[in-house]
Amino acid sequence: MIIPVTCAIIIQDQKVLAVRRSKSMPLAGFWEFPGGKIEEGESPASCIIREIKEELGIEIKLGEILPASDHAYSQEKVIRLIPFSAIIHSGEIKLYEHDQLSWLGANELFEVTWAPADIPIVSYLKEHWISIVNGIK
């Protein structure tokens, strides 16, 4: 079964936001792009807007949807990670589920230990950095 999950690549000052999973979460200590599971009847875009509000307390403006990536955590659990580029529209970031945040530039992307499902997204971002980071206003 494939579980659809969204994530936001939030861009600010030529850097992207990464958040670290807290001790109370599965995969504690791993870094990820914030986001979450799509609920029944919800579109990917409305899901990521809701999840970012819940996890970070901010409103975002979505840019483009980027190529999705599938990751099998087990034979029974495969997630399809659907990333969006985004910028902060309003609010100040507060960590409600994660225990740390970092703004990473292109050359800093691999300085943190990413959750396995996020690694293909990070690689795609690194390859297409200029068009993604400069593509949203």
Image: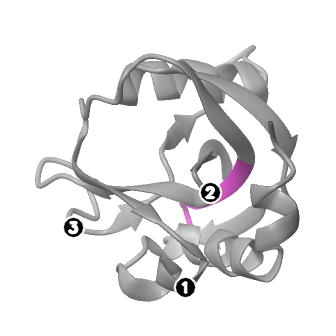
- Residue 81 lies within the magenta run: yes
Mark 1 and 2 residues: CB-CB less than 8 Å, in contact? no
Badge 1 amino acid? Asn
Q: Earlier in the sequence, mark 1 or mark 2?
A: 2
Q: Secondary structure at mark 2?
A: strand
Q: Is residue 59 above or below residue 75?
A: above
Q: Is residue 27 above or below residue 42?
A: below
Q: Nearer the viewer, residue 27 or 128?
A: 128
Left or right of 99? Residue 60 is right
Q: Which residue is mark 2?
A: 79
Give me the C-alpha separation between circle 1 and circle 3. 21 Å
Q: Which residues are magenta?
A: 76-83
Q: Earlier in the sequence, mark 1 or mark 3?
A: 3
Closer to the camera: disc 3 or disc 2? 3
Q: Nearer the viewer, residue 39 or 128?
A: 128
Q: Which residue is mark 3?
A: 29
